[in-house]
Image (cartoon, rainbow, N blue to C red):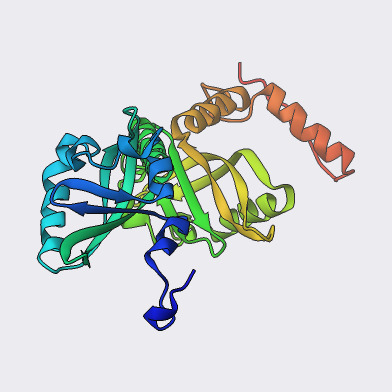
């Protein structure tokens, strides 16, 4: 609606049509609230809001800050958007993004405040913060190493457990190519090729070099990450130090293959070698010695 006497400027009635919430305060009293504000504050009738002190609707811990900003607006300043905790008429909590400025109505100075309902966003942010905290707490207690790389193989995240395994802190590793810690790049290439082919690997064998130069055996379980277009965007997964397990396997294999007294191949191992040679029809000679 427009008023011809105001040179095309809209009349005050247009405020009632705004989807955003608007309220006018004189001193600490709400003198006006548009329908959007009344709906947000869950007022059954305008008098539930209009004529009441503003501190009824503001959380006690935010009241001093909110009143200070209103005083600043009364002095002629324009307050930038700030978030305050508030309550509806029936006591339900709200999170509001509020801005305010001075207006003059019928020669009386008042504060015009506009605000948006940020309750759902605040709740979502709280859930995200809780999720992040839960994730970080889990990462801090892991013994295995969780990691994530981008499509170029650059490490974008690694959990603190990497310090116990490789001797590097997470901060020393993030931003570096994952391949930098492989003693043989062909092993890293084989891992990436397998992931690209199948989308994931489980218990894939590999080796890494620790900060002190020692080579360790690792087992990797990881999967490919995809962007919104379905393109390869990196990998994330878990790897663990299996050096002790591998050492035990090599020890057991040696005991099963070599005679513990002489250190040469035992009967079972020699028969296996002969069988392979015979299948290949390789020329050979066999000499039997009775050491007794």
- Relative to residue 188, is residue 205 depicted above or below? above
In the image, taking residue 109 as reference, residue 280 lies left or right, namely right
**Rendered location of residue 176, percent (x, y):** 41, 62
The quadrant in which residue 159 appears is: top left
Q: Quadrant of residue 230?
A: bottom right
Q: Position of residue 239 (x, y in %)?
A: 49, 40
Residue extending furthest top?
A: 292
List the single residue furthest toward the front. 5
Relative to 261, residue 167 above or below: below
Q: Position of residue 285 (x, y in %)?
A: 80, 39
In the rendered image, is residue 281 in sight?
yes
Taking the spot 37% from the left edge, 79% from the top edge, the residue there is 6
- Apparent side of residue 99 relative to residue 55 in the rendered image (left or right): right
For the point 24% across and 60% down, the residue is: 100
- 133 or 102, which lies in front? 102
Q: Residue at x 27, y 39 (%)?
A: 86
Q: Is residue 118 above or below residue 255?
A: below
How many numbered discs? Answer: 0
- In the drawing, does residue 117 fall left or right of residue 217? left
Q: Nearer the viewer, residue 260 or 46?
A: 46
Q: Which corner quadrant of the image does residue 286 belong to?
A: top right
Where's the C terminus, which quadrant?
top right
Nearest the camera: 81 or 261?
81
Answer whether residue 169 is visible to the viewer in this image: no
């Amino acid at each position: 609606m427009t008023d011809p006497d105001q040179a095309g400027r809209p009349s005050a009635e247009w405020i009632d049509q705004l989807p955003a919430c608007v309220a006018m305060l004189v001193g600490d009293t709400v003198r006006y609230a548009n329908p959007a504000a009344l709906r947000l504050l869950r007022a059954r009738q305008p008098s539930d809001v209009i004529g009441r002190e503003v501190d009824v609707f503001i959380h006690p811990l935010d009241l001093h800050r909110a009143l200070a900003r209103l005083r600043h607006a009364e002095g002629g300043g324009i307050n930038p958007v700030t978030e305050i905790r508030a309550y509806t008429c029936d006591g339900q909590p709200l999170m509001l993004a509020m801005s305010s400025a001075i207006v003059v109505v019928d020669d009386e100075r008042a504060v015009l405040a506009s605000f948006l309902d940020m309750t759902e966003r605040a709740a979502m942010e709280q859930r995200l913060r809780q999720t992040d905290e839960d994730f970080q707490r889990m990462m801090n207690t892991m013994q295995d190493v969780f990691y994530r790389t981008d499509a170029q193989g650059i490490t974008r995240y690694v959990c603190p457990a990497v310090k116990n395994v490789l001797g590097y802190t997470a901060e020393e590793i993030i931003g570096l190519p994952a391949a930098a810690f492989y003693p043989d790049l062909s092993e890293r290439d084989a891992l990436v090729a397998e992931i690209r082919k199948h989308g994931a690997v489980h218990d894939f064998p590999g080796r890494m070099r620790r900060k002190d130069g020692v080579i360790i055996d690792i087992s990797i379980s990881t999967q490919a990450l995809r962007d919104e277009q379905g393109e390869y965007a990196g990998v994330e997964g878990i790897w663990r130090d299996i050096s002790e397990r591998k050492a035990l396997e090599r020890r057991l294999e040696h005991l099963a293959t070599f005679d513990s007294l002489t250190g040469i191949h035992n009967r079972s191992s020699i028969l296996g070698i002969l069988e392979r040679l015979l299948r290949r029809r390789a020329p050979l000679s066999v000499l039997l010695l009775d050491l007794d």
